[in-house]
Image (cartoon, rainbow, N blue to C red):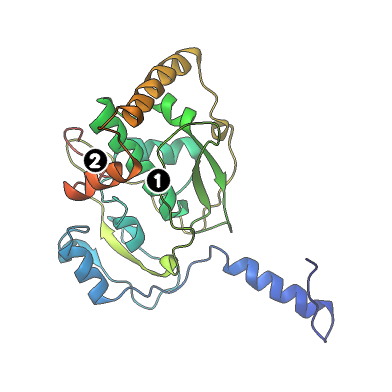
């Protein structure tokens, strides 16, 4: 579809396109309400009020040195600080910031950690992750510009994702990032204008050892899906951490 020009000529049309481009993934003033935070706290998704701070009128987040930026949509998908080592490693391997992930991408990671720790009895396996998923730039260049999807040639769980989580980018707030014995390092420093740039690591090349171990684990995944009367589904992965009130994306002393 061609670009629609305004009656005043191409300049206006170009300006509108530039504005639209700027808005894609751009930070907006937070629309989080006290009742939103109260509901998240009531559901056990965020810590006590002294560790959470509602933003003021700033458009671009300005967290304190010991704070990080959290989205309500992230909290409801199993994210809590300090970060699980696997998710923290993904940030470094892919060269992205936490706010670059879409809510659905984090749900994929939460389900994968649950699968490994609860059903396969292993720590999240890097080779299996690369065998099942691929990553890509998505939308604009800022908030929510990094996505995770299941490879079309892999028989994986059917995890129902919302095609669009309306308004999630505006529901952000500050939360204190504290370390614990399981995670001595906090979340990397926040960079509001960090760009998502494709790296070689996105190719998900596997070493011979990774490929062999991933194939063995993938066979176990298939068995979980096909064991008569005990089939594991995507709903089971999600309900496991919701019913147990565990944050899969949070660092823990022991695996789930």
| 22 horizontally vs 87: left or right | right
The residue identified by callout 2 is: 251
The part of the image, by quadrant, that contains residue 84 is top left
Q: Which residue lies furthest to the right in this view?
A: 9
Say if 199 sits above or below 46 in the image.
above
The part of the image, by quadrant, that contains residue 49 is bottom left
Q: Which residue lies furthest to the front in this view?
A: 228
Q: Can residue 234 be seen in this view?
A: yes
| 5 horizontally vs 111: left or right | right
Question: Residue 224: x, y in percent?
Answer: 32, 28
Say if 167 sits above or below 45 in the image.
below
Residue at image point 51% right, 21% down: 206
How many neighbours does mark 2 have within 10 angstroms: few (below 14), some (14-19), or many (20 or more)? Answer: many
Residue at image point 44% right, 70% down: 167
Among the two numbered marks 1 and 2 on one chain, the one whose residue lies closer to the N terminus: 1
Q: Quadrant of the N terminus?
A: bottom right
Cβ atoms under marks 1 and 2 closer than 8 Å: no
Disc 1 element: loop
- Which numbered dot is residue 159? 1
Which mark's residue is nearer the viewer, 1 or 2? 1
Q: Which of 90 and 127 is in front in this view?
A: 127
Q: Quadrant of the C terminus?
A: top left
Q: Which of 226 and 69 is in front in this view?
A: 226
């Amino acid at each position: 579809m061609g670009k629609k020009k305004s009656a005043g000529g191409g300049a206006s049309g170009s300006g509108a396109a530039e504005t639209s481009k700027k808005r894609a993934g751009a930070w907006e003033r937070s629309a989080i309400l006290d009742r939103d935070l109260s509901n998240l706290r009531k559901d056990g998704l965020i810590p006590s009020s002294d560790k959470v701070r509602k933003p003021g009128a700033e458009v671009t987040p300005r967290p304190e040195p010991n704070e990080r930026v959290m989205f309500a949509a992230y909290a409801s998908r199993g994210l809590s600080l300090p970060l699980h080592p696997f998710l923290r490693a993904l940030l470094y391997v892919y060269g992205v910031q936490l706010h670059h992930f879409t809510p659905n991408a984090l749900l994929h990671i939460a389900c994968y950690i649950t699968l490994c720790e609860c059903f396969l009895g292993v720590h999240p396996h890097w080779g299996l992750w690369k065998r099942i998923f691929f990553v890509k730039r998505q939308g604009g260049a800022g908030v929510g510009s990094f996505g995770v999807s299941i490879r079309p040639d892999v028989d994986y769980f059917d995890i129902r994702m919302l095609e669009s989580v309306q308004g999630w980018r505006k529901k952000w707030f500050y939360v204190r990032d504290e370390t614990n014995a399981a995670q001595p390092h906090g979340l990397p420093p926040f960079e509001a204008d960090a760009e998502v740039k494709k790296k070689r690591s996105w190719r998900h090349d596997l070493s011979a050892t990774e490929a062999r171990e991933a194939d063995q684990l993938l066979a176990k995944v298939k068995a979980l899906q096909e064991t008569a009367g005990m089939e594991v589904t995507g709903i089971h992965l999600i309900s496991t951490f919701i019913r147990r009130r565990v944050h899969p994306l949070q660092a823990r002393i022991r695996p789930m």
